Image (spheres, coloured by chain):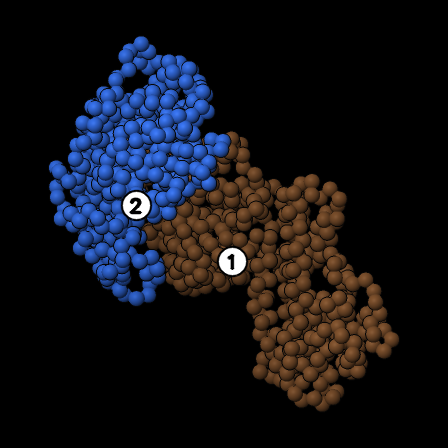
Chain colours: A brown, B blue
Amino acid sequence: MAGFFFLFGKRSFSNPPRFLLFSKIPILCSSTSSLVSSSQTLARSPIGSGFNNVVGGGIGGFPRVSVPRRFSSHPAAVPDLKTADGLTVDAIAAKDWPILGESESDWRSHAAAIAQSIQLIKKRMQWRKLIVRLDQVSAVLNKPDLWDDPVSAGRISREHGELLSKMKEVNGYEQELLEHIDLMKLAREENDEELEWESMKALVNMRRTAKEKELEALLSGDNDSCSCFIEVQAGAGGTESMDWAAMVMNMYKSWAQHRGFVVTIVEEMPGEIAGIKRATIKVDGDYAFGYAKAEVGVHRLVRISPFDSGKRRHTSFAAVAVIPILGDGSTRYQIKESDLRIERFRASGAGGQHVNTTESAVRIVHIPTGISATCQNERSQHSNKASAMAVLQSRLDQLEMARQAQLNAEHTQSLTDISWGNQIRTYVLHPYRMVKDLRTNYEVSDPDSVLGGDLDGFILNFLSYLLDKDEASV
Amino acid sequence: MTLRFPFPVCSPLPPVLASSLHRRLSIPSRSSSSFSPTPLFSSDHRPPLFLRPPAFAASRTDLHDFRRWAESLALAAGPRLSASDGGPDAALLRRELAWLVEDATVAAASESGVGEELRLRVELEELYRLWKARIEERRPFQYILGCEHWRDLVLVVKEGVLIPRPETEMVVDLVAEVEGFEKGLWADLGTGSGAIAVGIGRMLQEGGRVFATDLSPVALEVARLNVERYELKDKIELRRGSWFEPLRDVEGKLMGLVSNPPYIPSSHIPGLQAEVGQHEPKLALDGGDAGMDHLLHLCEGSASALKSGGFFAFETNGDEQSEFLADLMSIKLGNFFHNIKMISDFAGIQRFVTGFRR
């Protein structure tokens, strides 16, 4: 395999494109020996010659031996990927080839659409920031005293791996496009209809998956892949706003269930007459935080209150917070046992054998920060304590991340503090019907479907808006 | 810790006579005698609700109707129950109702909206009867389900066995802090449902063992179920008898002793919350005049039962009893014990007394 790596070392080639497996050009998926022995075919292939140009051809097709670059921690140093005739993805996009429908057999149109997607994906991933960050992380990794602090060393090397694999995936995708273009040109030159048809098919497939990849790229933030807690708190205004808070919470429960996340109620403080004063749910699943973070802020409801006998129009507010649940081992804040005060929630009387109760809620207070967490929905005190502890850990992690974000200008994606002035969305049920996001101006005229959990439009719009804004401010 | 004596130190300790203990403990289980008979519980050997096969069916609407009926019963009764003797309020009853439905239905069906038929582990009519017994007869929720969630365990319980309390969970944590506890011999005296023994047994390693004793055959039967359910037969040995009696062969060899003995003063028994006073076994609650008959017996017996360096943790009725015992053990029995501590539960009540054999 060393030769294989050597030959393709300068062009990250981790995932051989699917077509190679069926291609008429056997060399690309074969071992070093066949590469060498089939130098004739190599010469014929534009890809082969492309590589020869990059790497420098050896005598009679034998590659010149040099130190492989595969252990390099600097894929950013890889030169721009190009086709045989020197086209880059950016160059393709800049050509302004007309983009026609998917059904049209025009390879330029497909290539242009894919190139645009790749540009968008890179933009959403904040490509330039990634390169800067990778350089920083690599520099830290090369420090000799790195492992003096094993926790931070672990975190750094994990981040390094994640960055590398993120970038490798996009590079691989770029690579795939360029190679299909090369093959397409070759097929045309040689009048090889079968190859042309296969390449066209491959381009159309790429174009289809590109849309999915654009969406995935929206969720490339630090903790986007985590599960999360969603918390809803009623604003001032008594029963009407507590009812609103309950509606908001139900909206998230249905949204999460539709998306296939597992929802568990951690804490719920019911209102006296209806609704909730506050509630916390846990949303388990890939990218739960990445999506739900778009919901942070104050949600405003305008309707004729069913709790008002005068049938007047009311405006109420509910605040939403979303906290990522960092995976095991990646918690940012080390909690000291001695800093905790654990209290039985709503305990009264003698306790012990005197009392039979199924109420076993506990509140855990982190004394230095004053941050606390309560869980009352588990069936044993032990489990309530464990759940409350998980909430507390996440809250402290979030605090720590916010602190680090202030220290480190690279990480600007901290959640803004929720103040009641920070309204993000209005839901009007009367006199007209509409839900409007105040950040993106995205709006929908069917509040029932939104309150029933159809939130994806709002979320995706906000996520792309967020990244556009970020990009503009760089 | 300030040493303060709530009772005169010189007062003679109430003598604990095994014979009187036996007399009290031989009272037949209360559930079978005076309480209004509910025919569906006559078969005492039915497994807890959540372990029964889903042999029954009901429509979603039927279950919905049941919930609405049960909820209205809870809302009406809650304020009265909590005001009268500190019983459950409406919010707590509604949560219990949700758990009842959770245990009685097949999990997958309860959430999704597909399919009109729901599979139940009891007949729908029995659900009605169970909830009625909960509200009107104040039958403890845990007896109705036949289980108690305790620590990370789901323990089988039934009439005749004390329902393990949340406070008692901490005894297991206290044991886990003892150095080398994993390989020692432990005793859980008056094990009841076997809660503490199972909690400890699950943490033990090669060579570690718990002797769990109880005088009540019903308790031992339930404890056996729990030990088997958690596959701890090779770690926990159940023995029948009063306190130290069944442990003669390991006298002086125990690394630790734990117990949640009856500690309620006899005079408090008539005023207890209905779920406790009318349904739970008195022999697991009544601690004699000052509530300390058994605790004192345990303190004295520990000196010979524990090996040198051995640990004990006893649950008490709270502050006064704990202070009294802590003083007793560090002063009068100071030759035998040291490092005596009182530990608070999460409600801030000094619930446990712990210490070491010299």
Residue A222 vs A79, above or below: the answer is above
**Label 2 Cα crowd, 10 Å radius (few <14 / some 14-19 / many 20+):** some
CA distance separating discs 1 and 2: 39 Å
Residue B281 vs A13, above or below: the answer is above
| Number of dots carrying numbers | 2
Q: Which residue is mark 1?
A: A286
- Judge left or right: residue A121 versus residue B33: right
> What is the quadrant of the C terminus of chain A in the image?
bottom right
Q: Percent position (x, y) of residue A201? A: 61, 81
Q: Nearer the viewer, mark 1 or mark 2?
A: 2
Q: Amino acid at mark 1?
A: Asp
Q: Percent position (x, y) of residue A70? A: 74, 61
Q: A153 or A127: nearer the eye?
A: A153
Residue A392 vs A338, above or below: the answer is below
Q: Residue at x 44, y 23 (%)?
A: B308
Q: Percent position (x, y) of residue B109? A: 32, 61
Label 1: state its secondary structure.
loop
Q: Which residue is mark 2?
A: B225
- Judge left or right: residue A130 versus residue A281: right
Q: Which quarter of the figure has residue A359?
A: top left
